[in-house]
Amino acid sequence: MVGGSLMSKQKHVQHVKDIKSDRNFKIVNYTFLTIAMAVVLYPLIYVLSASISDPTAVNSGKMWLWPKDINFEGYKEIFNHGAIWRGYLNTIFYTVLGTTISLAITLPAAYTLGREDFVGRNFFTAVFVLTMFFEGGLIPTYLVVKNLGLIDTIWALVLPNAAAIWNIVIARVFFQSTIPKELEESAKIDGCSNFKLFFKIVLPLSAPIIAVMALFYGVDQWNNYFDALIYLKDRSLYPLQMVLREILVMQEMSAQDAGMTEELASSLHSKQELAAVIKYGVMIVSTLPIIIIYPFLQRFFVQGVMIGSLKG
């Protein structure tokens, strides 16, 4: 009886220690998550508040979190700004076209490199991976694009970066670890060709990795402005990010009266005022499509990333 009572007390003490340890872990965990949430949310709330606040209050620092002197002049200017909407439509077109081309290259390449019966698989994989560590650089790439006649065309924005080697590697791991070899063998026995096997069997079973690749390529294409800065001169082809960049650059410029005519100084000042009014609104408008689309792809995104990270 005494021994049983002593063991019971020891178990109780251990149980209390475990509960205390769990409680301390939860306190630390929730504290860290709260700080991380604040760090992530503050810029978002600030940009949203600034987009509907008076520009003077924003520039003077009076508005630091919540809206001050609410007005919607910024959004009115956005709706009336032709360059913004033209850039918006261009970005949507580039994103859809670029993502489609990237998927059309990435998925077949990944599946082919994952096939054990593909002759030269290791050689081509090594060549692909080598480009992850060594690249031609900006000037050779520009010369290639120029010699192909792609300068000042939409193809300069979607073809040079159509395939990312890392994405091909991820998709290859997915195909190798997810598509059963027995299924492929059964399809071949039934007379299924390689093309039919890929399009009729493999792709329908690969919704998670397709969603992951579409999200990766879509976000990269949506946020891309550097290629447009290098390859485009025609302003009618500018994507939204280039328009936003110009707005931010105008906001940073300072009008110096010395060496400027009154007309030029007045024009520059008006552009600065316009930039101050609409730049935060454009940030909100430019991120809305990605924010809206992501929840619909989140289930496939998490599943695809976890499969690719566990095996291979």
Image: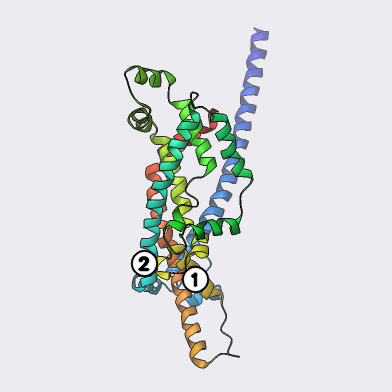
Q: Is disc 2 surrounded by few (<14), some (14 to 19) or many (20+) residues within 10 Å? A: some
Residue 174 lies, in percent from the top left, at 48, 31
> Observer-nearest residue: 139 or 66?
139
Residue 187 lies, in percent from the top left, at 35, 21
- Judged from the image, the secondary structure of the residue bearing numbered disc 2 is helix
Amino acid beneath label 2: Arg
> Observer-nearest residue: 24 or 53?
53
Q: Which numbered tag is attached to residue 86? A: 2
Q: Is residue 85 above or below residue 202?
A: below
The answer to whether residue 50 shows anywhere in this view is: no
Q: Quadrant of the C terminus?
A: top right
Residue 71 lies, in percent from the top left, at 39, 73
- Judged from the image, the secondary structure of the residue bearing numbered disc 1 is helix
Residue drawn at x 38%, y 52% is 97
Amino acid beneath label 1: Glu
Q: Is disc 1 surrounded by few (<14), some (14 to 19) or many (20+) residues within 10 Å? A: some
Q: Which numbered tag is attached to residue 225? A: none
Residue 208 occupies quadrant: top left
> Observer-nearest residue: 181 or 142?
142
Q: Is residue 10 above or below residue 144?
A: above
Residue 198 lies, in percent from the top left, at 37, 30
Furthest residue toward bottom: 262
Task: Count the marks.
Answer: 2
Specify how the rendered protein is coloured: rainbow
Residue drawn at x 43%, y 69% is 234
Query: Which residue in the structure is indicated by mark 1?
Result: 246
Residue 18 occupies quadrant: top right
The answer to whether residue 6 shows anywhere in this view is: yes
